[in-house]
């Protein structure tokens, strides 16, 4: 379950990306820009931009919570009671009949650091004009391939790990060790 702060951060990042595409953007392009920004930021800084969980799907990694909200918006549904209050996030986007996502609110830039903004801007500059199918193919990196192989044995093993995403972005061994240490510390303090 995501905290309200994590949901607000994901929402702000999504809206920030969407505001760069005045005519909206399709699912694949939004999800791949999120993934590539996350991957590069992890590799360099050892931190996630968003605490969304990336799942392996046929067209590459998909941020699970963002996908859920987009599908709810597309189908005109209200969020179910799964412990996450997605109402605000859901009201901030619209999805048209062609599955093009539009922002209807401004991002709360208090949730996005200057370094995160810089990474997102660089990612949009690098990938924003690319065809969605090309982006999908590019996202089939080592992290994705590793999970797809695991899914052959167990379809529930569909989640890309933070460390694998960082490695796919070119993280050094030292950075991977740092990420692992931070995860262990976080797990220790979150243990019941």
Image (tube, rainbow, N blue to C red):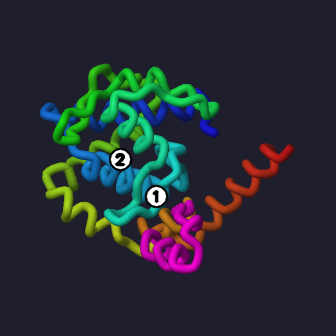
User: At which x and y percent is residue 67?
Assistant: 40, 44
Q: Is 139 within the magenta?
A: no
Query: Along the line of sight, which residue is nearer the eye, 90 or 41?
Result: 90
To which residue does mark 2 refer?
A: 119
Q: Is residue 70 left or right of residue 101?
A: right
Crowd tier of the residue under label 2, counting other residues whose Cα lies within 10 Å: few below 14, some 14–19, many 20 or above: some
To which residue does mark 1 refer?
A: 44
Check the image and report above or below for 146 versus 97: below
- Mark-to-mark CA distance, 1 and 2: 10 Å
Q: Quarter holding the N terminus?
A: top right
Q: Which residue: 49% across, 29% down?
A: 79
Residue that sits furthest to the right in the current view: 192
Query: Along the line of sight, which residue is nearer the eye, 7 or 167?
Result: 7
Q: Quarter holding the C terminus?
A: top right
Name the image quarter holding residue 189.
top right
Using the rendered image of the protein, determine whether residue 175 is visible from the camera's viewpoint: no
User: At which x and y percent is residue 115?
Assistant: 41, 41
User: At which x and y percent is residue 34?
Assistant: 36, 48
Q: Which residue: 45% across, 21% down?
A: 88
Using the rendered image of the protein, determine whether residue 28 is visible from the camera's viewpoint: yes
Q: Which residue: 34% across, 50% down?
A: 31
User: At which x and y percent is residue 78?
Assistant: 45, 25
Q: Are marks 1 and 2 in contact (CB under 8 Å)?
A: yes
Q: Which residue: 44% across, 49% down?
A: 63
Number of numbered discs present? Answer: 2
* Extent of the magenta region: 143-161
Check the image and report above or below for 43 versus 81: below
The earlier-in-sequence mark between 1 and 2 is 1
Judging from the image, what secondary structure is the residue with disc 1 in? Answer: helix
Judging from the image, what secondary structure is the residue with disc 2 in? Answer: helix
């Amino acid at each position: 379950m995501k905290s309200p702060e994590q949901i607000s951060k994901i929402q702000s990042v999504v809206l920030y990306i969407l505001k760069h595409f005045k005519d909206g953007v399709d699912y694949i392009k939004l999800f791949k820009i999120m993934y590539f920004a996350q991957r590069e930021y992890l590799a360099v800084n050892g931190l996630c931009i968003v605490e969304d969980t990336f799942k392996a799907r046929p067209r590459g990694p998909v941020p699970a919570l963002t996908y859920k909200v987009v599908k709810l918006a597309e189908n005109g549904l209200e969020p179910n009671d799964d412990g996450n209050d997605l109402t605000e996030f859901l009201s901030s986007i619209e999805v048209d009949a062609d599955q093009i996502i539009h922002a209807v609110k401004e991002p709360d830039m208090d949730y996005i650091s200057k370094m995160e903004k810089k990474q997102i801007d660089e990612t949009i500059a690098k990938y924003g004009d690319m065809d969605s199918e090309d982006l999908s193919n590019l996202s089939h990196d080592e992290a994705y391939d590793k999970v797809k192989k695991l899914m052959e044995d167990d379809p529930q093993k569909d989640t890309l790990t933070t460390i694998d995403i960082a490695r796919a972005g070119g993280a050094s061994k030292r950075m991977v060790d740092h990420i692992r240490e931070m995860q262990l510390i976080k797990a220790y303090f979150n243990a019941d």
